[in-house]
Image: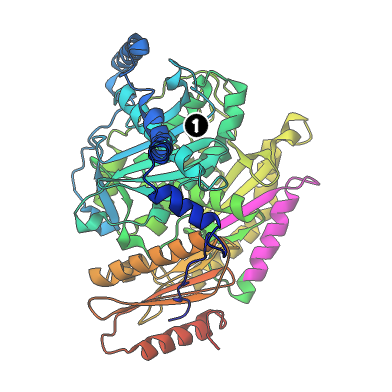
């Protein structure tokens, strides 16, 4: 129902007469003349030869640079063997006392032996000359595979990108589904590509949405840019690529640590289809609490005198207030939930509550004491902090702690150095000051230019926060705690739902514990529903209203409604419900909790 209409009919190539273009094409195709056959063979050879050439030109099949490849491999092995076992960029089994099954977290299990998952970042503008193919590789996971294998993967990806651009110059391929692998593409910056190659697994738990995998790539890139700036800017600063590689390798590998449990990487599966990565989850405020928060934000803005500052306030892992743009809010919110909130500090690892509810404490404690995928702390050239000999690794675990004055402290940026990040909207670097009282976390952003010019001092800003905002912080935390309904605060009895506002980049969903009660057949139906919506959105490239309903094998209903940039996904497991009953339930939910946004009236 809804927008399930399909276009029918085909337009004529000739547009009319028998002597038109179509007639000529039919003559060339069916004539059987030798010159026409040879021309056809030539056309197909060119079309399908481009990907093959690009895939193979960098491999060691070319004798002209076989020595080059062997020397590069020897250099890589020497670099790895010269480091201690804790400093290698290699995959290590985490010695977990308690093994938690990946299904418990709704994530697809992937062996980290390099066969199941490959992730690479490369620059199409580099390595175009014979013998220089390695220059285009900016990052490759797992890093301990041979360079010939890396070039084979990147060569194939480059060939697929080039081939698809022949048909769609403005938007190259997003995914290629092969028999054994899925190739997920994301153009992070012009000619800077991130590609994830995932091995297909017959296990039912390894079912995922391509859009969910793409958002993993988007998230890691957005976080990288927030801390280090764009990849292209680092390449322009140091054209040999050494600087960008020294930042990308530890950063992305630290990020992958958060997706690992034991020896496995956990990719988003169908079990977390009622969650949306790349959005923030907001706390609903009562009127009196909202007024107190507004007053607190005003005080925080004045802590830097006449200078304009930004702030972000979180309660537990939910957003309370922000003065940033939606994109900057998402990035800083994501990092705060990963490393800064009270939940993140108390667990000793990423809380990432919107992905990882249900992770056992025993597993978390064993993770924090186990060796990580990357353990290197050796200085690398040209960091982005105050110490030019360091590479900043903001995603490292157990690097933030709460000081006596309530401000969070870390040595990631160097001893006594203040953390800094980039804001996308204003393109300015700001100092990050995080203050925490119980479950309330405040993030204050102070422009670095003011500190450099001597207009402001970080210690002065901290003093102003403690002096002027302490009373309001206590009051806000008290009001929010009284109105806090716990993890199930947004549970609606009888419904399992996901609400997404694409314009504001905000989402709200049923608690993970409640979603876990859904039958596997229901979750698979929702996953299929979201795939259908993703395909339709990708095809049209514009907002449209639609409603799609799917009946699962267990007679549950999976329903999606889209309107004006907002999306609602819902699962209803009453087997006796007819389609009319299900749509009435959605209508009732929309009227009561969404101000009628998704009503069909």
Q: Is residue 178 visible?
A: yes
Q: Residue 145 versus residue 2: which sits nearer the camera? A: 2
Q: Is residue 599 left or right of residue 210?
A: right
User: SS class of the residue under badge 1?
Assistant: loop
Is residue 399 shown left or right of residue 409? left
Q: Which residue matches tag 1?
A: 412
Q: Quadrant of residue 251?
A: top left
Q: Residue at x 58, y 56 (%)?
A: 313
The percent position of residue 148, horizontal first and vertical second, equals 32, 23
**Residue 359 in sight:** no
Name the spot of residue 97 as percent of width and height, x first.
18, 44
Taking the spot 47% from the left edge, 80% from the top edge, the residue there is 2
Choose between 147 and 303: the one closer to the eye.
147
Q: Tell me the crowding category of disc 1: few under 14, some 14 to 19, or many 20 or more residues within 10 angstroms, Cα based.
A: many
| Residue 476, placed above or below residue 145 | below
Q: Which residues are magenta?
A: 290-313
Quadrant showing the N terminus: bottom left
């Amino acid at each position: 129902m809804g927008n399930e209409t399909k276009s029918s009919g085909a337009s004529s190539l000739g547009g009319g007469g028998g002597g038109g273009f179509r007639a000529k094409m039919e003559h060339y195709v069916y004539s059987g003349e030798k010159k026409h056959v040879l021309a056809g063979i030539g056309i197909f050879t060119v079309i399908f030869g481009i990907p093959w050439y690009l895939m193979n030109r960098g491999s060691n099949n070319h004798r002209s640079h076989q020595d080059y490849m062997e020397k590069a491999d020897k250099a890589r092995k020497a670099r790895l063997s010269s480091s201690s076992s804790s400093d290698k960029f290699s995959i290590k089994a985490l010695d977990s006392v308690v093994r938690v099954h990946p299904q418990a977290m709704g994530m697809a299990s992937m062996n980290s032996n390099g066969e199941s998952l490959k992730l690479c970042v490369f620059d199409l503008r580099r390595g175009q000359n014979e013998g220089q193919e390695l220059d285009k590789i900016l990052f490759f996971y797992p890093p301990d595979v041979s360079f010939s294998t890396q070039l084979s993967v990147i060569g194939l990806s480059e060939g697929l990108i080039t081939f698809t651009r022949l048909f769609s110059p403005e938007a190259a391929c997003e995914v290629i589904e092969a028999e054994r692998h899925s190739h997920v593409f994301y153009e992070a910056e012009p000619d800077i590509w991130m590609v994830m190659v995932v091995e297909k697994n017959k296990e039912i738990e390894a079912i995922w949405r391509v859009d969910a995998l793409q958002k993993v790539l988007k998230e890691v890139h957005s976080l990288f840019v927030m801390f280090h700036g764009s990849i292209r800017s680092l390449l322009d600063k140091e054209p040999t690529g050494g600087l960008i590689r020294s930042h990308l390798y530890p950063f992305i590998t630290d990020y992958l640590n958060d997706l690992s449990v034991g020896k496995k990487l956990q990719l988003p599966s169908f079990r977390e289809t009622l969650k949306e990565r790349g959005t923030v989850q907001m706390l609903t405020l009562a009127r009196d609490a909202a007024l107190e928060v507004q007053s607190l934000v005003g005080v925080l803005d004045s802590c830097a005198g006449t200078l304009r500052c930004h702030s972000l306030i979180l309660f537990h892992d939910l957003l309370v207030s922000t003065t940033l743009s939606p994109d900057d809010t998402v990035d800083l919110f994501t990092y705060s939930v990963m490393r800064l909130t009270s939940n993140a500090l108390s667990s000793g690892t990423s809380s990432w509550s919107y992905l990882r509810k249900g992770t056992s404490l025993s597993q978390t404690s064993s993770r924090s004491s186990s060796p990580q995928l990357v353990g290197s702390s050796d200085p690398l050239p040209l960091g982005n902090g105050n110490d030019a000999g360091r590479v900043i690794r903001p995603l490292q675990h157990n690097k933030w702690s709460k000081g006596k004055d309530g401000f969070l402290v870390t040595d990631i940026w160097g001893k006594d150095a203040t953390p800094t990040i980039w804001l996308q909207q204003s393109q300015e670097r700001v100092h990050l000051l995080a203050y925490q009282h119980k479950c309330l976390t405040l993030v204050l952003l102070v422009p670095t230019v003011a500190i450099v010019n001597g207009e402001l001092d970080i210690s002065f800003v901290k003093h102003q926060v403690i002096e002027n905002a302490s009373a309001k912080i206590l009051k806000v935390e008290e009001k929010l705690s009284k109105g806090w309904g716990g993890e199930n605060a947004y549970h609606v009895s009888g419904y399992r739902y996901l609400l997404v506002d694409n314009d504001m980049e905000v989402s709200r969903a049923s608690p993970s514990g409640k979603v876990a009660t859904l039958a596997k057949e229901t979750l698979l139906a929702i996953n299929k529903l979201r795939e259908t919506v993703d395909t339709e959105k990708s095809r049209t490239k514009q907002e449209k209203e639609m409603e799609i309903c799917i009946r699962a094998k267990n007679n549950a209903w999976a329903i999606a409604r889209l309107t004006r940039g907002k999306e609602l996904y819902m699962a209803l497991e009453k087997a006796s419900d007819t389609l009319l009953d299900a749509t009435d339930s959605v209508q009732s939910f929309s009227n009561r909790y969404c101000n009628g946004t998704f009503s069909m009236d």
